[in-house]
Image (cartoon, grey):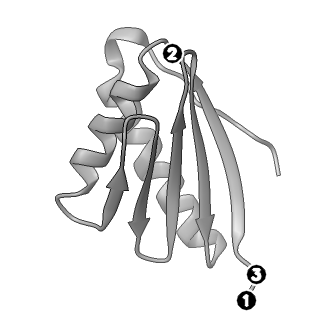
Amino acid sequence: MNRLITRGAVTTATASRYLTQLCKHFAHKIPVEYGANSGRADFPGGSCHFDADDATLSLRLEADSEQSLQHIKAVVEDHLVRFGWRESLNITWESR
């Protein structure tokens, strides 16, 4: 089965902090691995890979179905927007 993939990016000078915050939060419920500049959260039906540099938090979502992909996207976006409310973070998703 082909995995569905979509990518997103958030412009922020604190990308590593958000990566860590998201991974620590998700680790309470799902398997997560992370370091200062990269991480992975394994959701039911798919995963989200995080990469942080000095200016951007990059997201790569993979899933087995469109429904799983949209669910992971919604969960990650909801948490990131809430955690980054002070910056009014906005995720730019690639069009598929």
- Residue 1, label in figure: 1
Instruction: Tell me the residue at 76%/81% (across/down).
Output: 2
Which residue type does callout 2 highlight? Thr
Find the distance from the CA under tag 3 to the CA under tag 1. Answer: 4 Å
| Residue 12, numbered label | 2
Tally of marks: 3
Vertical arrangement, residue 59 with respect to residue 30, above or below: above
Q: Nearer the viewer, residue 16 or 4?
A: 16
User: Is the C-beta separation of discs 3 and 1 under 8 Å?
Assistant: yes
As drawn, is 55 to the left or to the right of 4? Answer: left
Q: Position of residue 74 (x, y in %)?
A: 48, 50
Q: Amino acid at mark 1?
A: Met
Q: Identify which residue, 30 or 39, lies in the foreground.
A: 39
Label 1 crowding class (10 Å Cα cut-off): few <14, some 14-19, many 20+?
Answer: few
Assign a secondary structure to mark 2: loop
x, y (%) of residue 19?
A: 39, 36
State which tag comes first along the sequence, 1 or 2.
1
| N-term mark: 3 or 2 | 3
Q: Is residue 69 left or right of residue 26?
A: right
Hey, which residue is sitting farthest left in the picture? 28
Amino acid type at circle 3 is Asn
Q: Which residue is mark 3?
A: 2
1 and 2 marks in contact (CB < 8 Å)? no
Q: Nearer the viewer, residue 10 or 81?
A: 10
Compute the Cα span from label 3 to label 2.
32 Å
Residue at screen point 41% across, 51% down: 75
Tell me if residue 33 comes above or below residue 30 in the rendering. Answer: above
Which quarter shows the N terminus? bottom right
* Label 1, label 2: how far apart the Cα atoms are: 35 Å
